[in-house]
Image (cartoon, grey):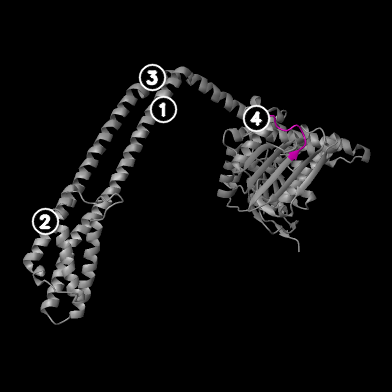
Amino acid sequence: MFKVVANIRTRYRWALIAIALLISTSASLMQYYFSVQKYDAKIINMAGKQRMLSQKIAWHSNELLLSATNISEHTKALKASVVSFKKTHNYLLSKNANGEYQYLTPKLIKLYTLAPHKLDSQVATYIQQAENLLYQQGQVDKRIFYVTEVEELLKQLDHAVNLFEEQAVQKLNWVSNLELLFWLMAMFLLLVELRFVFMPMEKEIGNALSKYQKQKEFAQQVSQNKEHFIARASHEFRTPLQGLITSIEELKVSDTQQSVKTQANYCALRLIAILDELQDLQALSTGKWVPQFKNENLLESCNKVLMAYEHACQQKGLKLVSCLDESLNCVCKLDHQRLQHTLTELISNAIKFTTEGEITVSAKLFNDELCVTVSDTGCGFSKEITDLEFDSFKQTNHFQGLRTGLTRVQYVVKALHGEITFKNNEANGALVSLHLPIIASKALPNPRKINDKLKCLVVEDNPLNTILLTRILSLLGLSYDCAENGKVACDMVSENQYDIVFMDLNMPVMDGFEAIKKIRSDLNKIMPIIVITANTSQNDIERAYKNGANLHIHKPISQQAIKDALNSISVASEIN
């Protein structure tokens, strides 16, 4: 199969090259001859203009010779006509560096220079007599301006125009024949290509397609099963993880046990990161991932990552050097979570392959572009890296361990229209440079306070999730009611006034999708609806927004996530 395809590809390429050369040659020649036609048209126009100018010269000269009125006007017009007539005549008879006429054919040369016509001499005499009359420089031969003499000159000038036109027509006919020849050659090449390329290719590929169709369907089914499994597993894991994280945060432990609590919290967060990693990779590889842009402080986003790695560097005896420019201390619209993940992967690998020395992280804003470099004093790269490999088995050994994460880095950087480069330091170690376009603002956001007079409705069928969410609302000073499914929630919304609705999507009796749609369409309620769900399917999230949701938060949730959501829907006010 591959041998047949290779043979067809070779023949197809040669056919394309032949057609490309033919078309290019044809186009080049056509352009050349069309440009020549432009000059021919110009020359014909100038030759025709000579006839008109000769008549004007005769008329104005006769008026000056026979009439005593309007002498200045005729003199002015005669001067302009003589200058133009002389200039045009000299242009038509101009020669190149080799002394050859540029615009005259042999017939025209004969007309202009040889007996019996000697048109060049006639024109020179005509011009001379007109200048004598105009400038009073000598005796004027009035007969040269008589009708019979002028008619003879016009006849010769007209003959010259005809010869110029004949030359242009010959060139046009030649171009037309050349165009026909190229068309016939192109048709012949297309027939050859059809016979020896497309027909064999159609036959071979048709047989191959029927053979591999079942394999394609099988692969699609496997991909769908994988996507459904990842989505389902994520949904099932997030609910207990929500309870685990909240429970760990609520634990009251002694100072000696604080490290155990920190480790437990880290492990739980790591499980969530793994779920996010799997889902992101699936969405990125299928083209369904969409960046989540938020307005947050860029310096804080970077510092959160660096703080997390200070302990790891200390344990390995490395020095973590942070060079974050003050220009980062601004709010910018960016997918901050994905930026933090990218920095995490790059710093993790720098630490992994550095046994002694330091890790240096530098970042600054320049012309609406975030420039980040991560350098280390480790082993560096064994070869030049132009791009990260998507196939984890082909990745360079400098990235062993977290290959899936670094594949996500490449997808994310490309999706954000950024650029990432890899090279070795001049001394030793690796240097990774990241450039991302961003939308930055110089103003920092004012602190905001949640309005504690808001009344919320929590719609959740899982008791544990209800407890966790209501606990967060209580900490924020908000009052709330609870509903165990969408139907109960719609009844409560119709009977009571709520400022915000927190809506789960997957519930019995009536799910969140139907409940949102009913609240908007049937009950005509306009309060903000925030979706709280473990469902990370992009299609389901879009469906929720289409039905009328204002915002969504993925489980497990945190108090900060709820605060950010309330700020986003403008129910928080600035602190004066």
Name the mark on residue 203. 3
Distance CA(mark 4)–CA(mark 1): 43 Å
| Extreme residue in the bottom direction | 68
Q: Which mark is in front, 4 or 3?
A: 3
Name the mark on residue 230. 4
Q: How many marks?
A: 4
- Amino acid carrying label 2: it is His
Residue pointed to by mark 2: 117
Disc with the residue nearer the chain's start (3 vs 2): 2
Residue pointed to by mark 1: 13
Res 536 seen here: no
Identify the residue shown where x is 29% and y is 51%.
Answer: 96
Q: Give the magenta-colored segment's residue range.
A: 375-384
Left or right side of 298 for 390: left
Q: Which mark is in front, 3 or 1?
A: 1
Left or right side of 184 for 377: right
Disc with the residue nearer the chain's start (4 vs 3): 3
Distance CA(mark 4)–CA(mark 3): 40 Å
Disc with the residue nearer the chain's start (2 vs 1): 1
